[in-house]
Each structure stands twice: as C-alpha cells, then as structure tokens.
Image: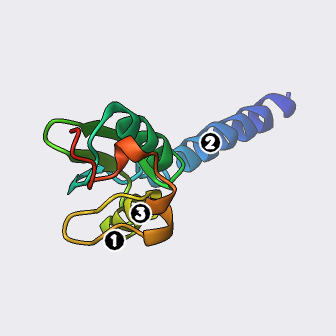
Amino acid sequence: MKFFPSFLLALSLLVSSTGAFAQGKPKAKGPATETLQVKTSAVCDMCKARLEKSLAYEKGVQAAILDVPSQVLTVTYRPDKTTPTALRTAVQQTGYDADKQTADARAYDRLPDCCKKTNNVH
C-alpha cells in the first residue's frame, strides 16, 4: 500500500514540472516586412521581368513588382535580412537606374536595345 501514495506523489511532480516548462517565454515572430519604392529607368515588359526576377534572388526580398508606366519598383523585404541601399545596388547591378543613382555601366551595356533608356521608341 505504500506504493500508491508514492505513485501519486511522483505523478503530481511530473504534471507540475511539465506545466512549469510550458510557461517559458513565447517565441517572438519574425520582424515585419517593410516596403521600398525605387524609381527606375525601366521602359518595357522585358525590363519588368528582368528586374522582378533579379530581385527575387536577393536575400530578404519577399516580393518585387514593377509598374512600367510609372517606372516605380515596389519591393517588400525583411529589414533584418537586407537594407534599402543593398536593394538599390541590386537594381543598379541589373542595369537600371535606382532613384538618383545611375546604373552599373557594364550591366547597362548588356541590356537588350529595347531596355535602354536612350531608346526613343518608348
């Protein structure tokens, strides 16, 4: 009969200790995303595809959408993974202007003729 009280004591200790572990700190959710709008020199749908694909490979980027008529690239990103400066640099290295910063010359030269801002067709 001594087994039953010691069993109840052990069971109550087990139940109370699992409850104590469950009261730990709640895990913080990841940081919220931020949105950046960059004025680009993109002029056509090929530019749109090129920029959106290029930024999809950037660390921390959740989405990148270019509005061709306004030439504004809207990037949703995680600020703990990247910065606005890094995103503008990625746009420049793709061959397009990013706000007041001009495109990387070598990347710009590799763009198709229709995507160059000096093209008067657009």
Q: What crowding class fits label 3: few (fewer than 14 Cα within 10 Å), some (14-19), or many (20 or more)?
A: few
Give me the residue at 19% from left, 70% from top. 100
Distance from disc 1 to disc 2, alpha carbons, whole Å, reads 47 Å
The earlier-in-sequence mark between 1 and 2 is 2
Q: Position of residue 45 (x, y in %)?
A: 34, 31
Q: Earlier in the sequence, mark 2 or mark 3?
A: 2
* Residue 18: image tag: 2
**Percent coordinates x, y for residue 115 in the rendering:** 36, 45
Crowd class of label 2 (few under 14; some 14 to 19; many from 20; radius 10 Å): few
Q: Position of residue 122 (x, y in %)?
A: 21, 39
Q: Amino acid at mark 1?
A: Thr
Residue labelled with disc 3:
80
Residue ID for mark 1 = 85
Task: Give me the C-alpha separation between circle 1 and circle 3.
Answer: 13 Å
Residue type at mark 3 is Asp
Q: Quadrant of residue 25?
A: bottom left
User: Could you tell me which residue is drawn at 35 percent across and 37 percent down?
Assistant: 48
Seen in the image, is 76 located left or right of residue 46? Answer: left
